[in-house]
Image (cartoon, grey):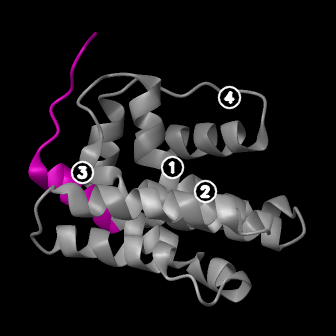
Amino acid sequence: MDEVTISEEDRRQLALWAADCVERALPLFEAKAPADPRPREAVEGIRAFVRGGKRTAKPRSLAWAGHAAAREVDDPAATAAARAACHAAATPYIHPLATPHQSKHVLGPAVYEAFARELAAGDDTDAADEEIRWAIEHAPPEVRALLRRMPARNPGRSRLDTLYHELDAALRR
């Protein structure tokens, strides 16, 4: 399996972009589960990594906690928002493998954020398209370069697959 080089700066820029994307959807989770701080803590943890924190067990445990929050909330948009936070907190741990699965980890925070907005808007695809455009406009060069070292995503069949594919294709331009 081919490997890609992922520098610490690549990881920090990816984490910063992921946190910026996810924060746009956190209110969707917090409106449905105001007493559950786990997705917000996941984003705060990734921001600590961006500011010079180490890749320790802490961000990983925050990612798993965000994932648990997604399973426990009873609202599709809130679930997607919590999954976005989980993906963001996991960005420091992507493997240096040139696989579509690893590109999914790069794109996951922005894709789930966009999907959360779409679900909150009553399945209005324009809401997700707007968020994907925002993510494209705010993606740093390091994220684009990292993604270009991985295989391109296929369109797939689901709405999430479509969002992954659209974001992937746009960031490669």
Count residues near mark 1 (Cα–Cα under 10 Å), then give few for <14, some for 14-19, many for 20+. many
Res. 94 image quadrant = top left
Count residues near mark 3 (Cα–Cα under 10 Å), then give few for <14, some for 14-19, many for 20+. some
| SS type, badge 1 | helix
Q: Specify which label sits upstream in the sequence, 3 or 1.
A: 1
> Residue 97: x, y in percent?
28, 24
Q: Are marks 2 and 1 in contact (CB under 8 Å)?
A: yes
The front one of 54 and 71 is: 71
Q: Of all residues shown, which one is farthest toward the top?
A: 1
> Residue 141: x, y in percent?
27, 53
Q: Are marks 4 and 3 in contact (CB under 8 Å)?
A: no
Q: Which residue is mark 4?
A: 155
Q: Which residues are magenta?
A: 1-16
Q: Residue at x 39, y 78 (%)?
A: 41
Q: Which residue is mark 2?
A: 112
| SS type, badge 4 | loop
| SS type, badge 3 | helix
Q: Which residue is mark 1?
A: 108
Q: Are marks 2 and 3 in contact (CB under 8 Å)?
A: no
Q: Which residue is mark 3?
A: 142
Q: Amino acid at mark 1?
A: Gly
Q: Specify which label sits upstream in the sequence, 4 or 1.
A: 1
CA–CA distance between discs 2 and 3?
21 Å
CA–CA distance between discs 2 and 4?
16 Å
